[in-house]
Amino acid sequence: LDAELQLDRLKPKLSRRVLLLQGHQSSWHGALALVPGAPPLCHNLTAYLRDEADVKDKLSAVALSLSLALPGGGPGLVLYGDTLVHTQVRGT
């Protein structure tokens, strides 16, 4: 499957508040190989919030999206989901 993760996707790319630790980007693309009978795969991606001084919008939720599609122009989208982070944590 072709996978795409978008962090803080409702914001313009230059205004995104959440970035991936590796590469400091707000999105990740990858291929997930599914083999019948094989154990499930796990991918860990570490993200971080940008420094408070760099962020203007501190109140709206962070929208994440994950899309999975069949590779090679198959029948199209298999799964698409959005997750809104409702819990707010404030560091002291």
Image (cartoon, rainbow, N blue to C red):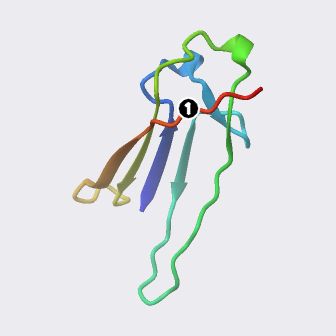
Extreme residue in the left direction: 75
Q: Residue at x 60, y 24 (%)?
A: 17
Please tell me which residue is depicted at 61% across the width and 31% down the height of the picture. 18
On screen, residue 10 versus residue 19, left or right, reads left
Q: Is residue 29 shown above or below 8?
A: below
In the picture provided, is 8 more to the left or to the right than 79? Answer: right
Q: Nearer the viewer, residue 58 or 10?
A: 58
In the image, farthest residue toward the right: 92
Residue shown at the point (46%, 53%) measured from the top left: 3
Residue 80, position as x, y percentages in the image: 32, 49
Q: Which residue is mark 1?
A: 88
Among the 4 quarters of the image, the one containing residue 88: top right
The C terminus - image quarter? top right
Q: Residue 86, position in %: x, y?
A: 45, 36
Residue 73 in percent (x, y) is at 30, 54
Mark 1 element type:
loop
Question: Which sits in the foreground, 49 or 35?
Answer: 49
